[in-house]
């Protein structure tokens, strides 16, 4: 039961403000979210590829997207003289561990603008890590084994997906709004477009990419060919 006791003017004002705030908060729900889904097709030499996997689709400029970076920590293992996985997508500021599970030494390095590092030689059972603080594509190599190649894509949003062989992708829980959308591929130019997400809606995208020719050769960290390294 409400008290009829007379309130002082400051108390009365405070009570009114509190009541209005409560009323407004009830009628002011947070921004709604929706989904983005679609399919990527890749043209190679005039024909559509059957395998459309490993295309990275992500949104830019989504507000309030500050994920817990500790939960987004990833690992790229050195196993059977390969990097596993050979494609990793992380959010800027996240860390990747590089454990060596082979019986031989490895020397992981990158000369990419997004991240330049040299982890040096280390043996089986040891692991080193790097925190990625710039967006972009990181080309990952081993200074001893030229066949060891991987890609790291560093994005500034948790709203990303990697396509499977059928080229399909889906992003859920996206705040309503209009955002730039990017589809990155390792062997050609990226797609850039725009998508509008509505509360409870499901925005559909049909993304078309063209695969080009990419050189498979690379040099050691000192700029020399692998066959001439000493």
Image: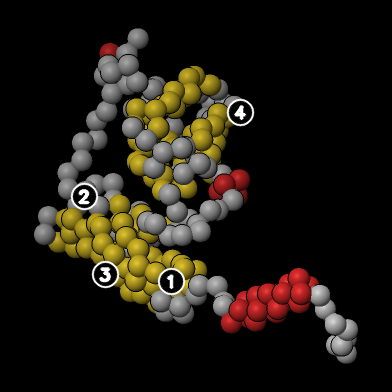
Q: Of marks 3 and 4, which one's residue comes earlier in the chain?
A: 4
SS under mark 4:
loop
Position of residue 43 relative to residue 78, above or below, is below
| Disc 1 to disc 3: CB gap under 8 Å | no
Residue 51 shows up from this direction: no
Horizontal and vertical percent for residue 33? 48, 73
Q: Quadrant of residue 38?
A: bottom left
Q: Nearer the viewer, residue 181 or 111?
A: 181
Residue 108 shows up from this direction: yes
| Disc 3 to disc 4: CB gap under 8 Å | no
Query: Cα distance, mark 1 to mark 2?
Result: 28 Å
Left or right: 22, with 107 as reference point: right
SS under mark 1:
loop
Query: Cα distance, mark 3 to mark 4?
Result: 44 Å
Position of residue 130 relative to residue 53, above or below, is above
Residue at image mark 1:
176
**Quadrant showing the N terminus:** bottom right
Q: Which mark is residue 189?
A: 2
Q: Of marks 2 and 3, which one's residue comes earlier in the chain?
A: 2
Horizontal and vertical percent for residue 27? 59, 82
Q: Which mark is residue 36?
A: none
- Say which residue appears at 57% left-offset and 47% top-offset: 69
Label 4: few (<14), some or many (≥20) within 10 Å?
Answer: few
Horizontal and vertical percent for residue 76? 49, 39
Residue at image mark 4:
125
**Quadrant showing the C terminus:** top left
Label 2: few (<14), some or many (≥20) within 10 Å?
Answer: few
SS under mark 3:
strand
Q: Which mark is residue 206?
A: 3
Label 1: few (<14), some or many (≥20) within 10 Å?
Answer: some
| Disc 2 to disc 4: CB gap under 8 Å | no
């Amino acid at each position: 039961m409400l008290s009829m006791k007379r309130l002082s003017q400051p108390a009365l004002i405070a009570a009114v403000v509190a009541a209005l705030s409560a009323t407004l908060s009830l009628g002011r729900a947070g921004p709604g979210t929706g989904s983005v889904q679609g399919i990527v097709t890749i043209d190679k030499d005039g024909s559509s590829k059957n395998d459309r996997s490993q295309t990275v689709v992500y949104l830019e400029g989504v507000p309030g997207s500050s994920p817990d970076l500790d939960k987004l920590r990833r690992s790229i293992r050195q196993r059977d003289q390969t990097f596993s996985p050979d494609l990793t997508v992380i959010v800027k500021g996240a860390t990747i561990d590089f454990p060596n599970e082979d019986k031989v030494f490895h020397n992981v390095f990158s000369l990419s603008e997004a991240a330049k590092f040299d982890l040096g030689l280390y043996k089986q059972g040891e692991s080193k890590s790097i925190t990625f603080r710039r967006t972009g594509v990181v080309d990952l190599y081993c200074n001893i084994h030229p066949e060891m190649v991987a890609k790291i894509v560093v994005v500034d949003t948790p709203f990303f997906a990697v396509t499977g062989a059928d080229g399909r992708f889906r992003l859920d829980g996206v705040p309503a709004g209009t955002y730039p959308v990017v589809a990155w591929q390792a062997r050609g130019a990226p797609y850039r477009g725009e998508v509008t997400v509505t509360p409870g809606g499901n925005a559909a995208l049909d993304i078309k990419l063209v695969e080009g020719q990419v050189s498979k050769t690379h040099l050691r960290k000192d700029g020399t060919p692998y066959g001439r390294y000493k």
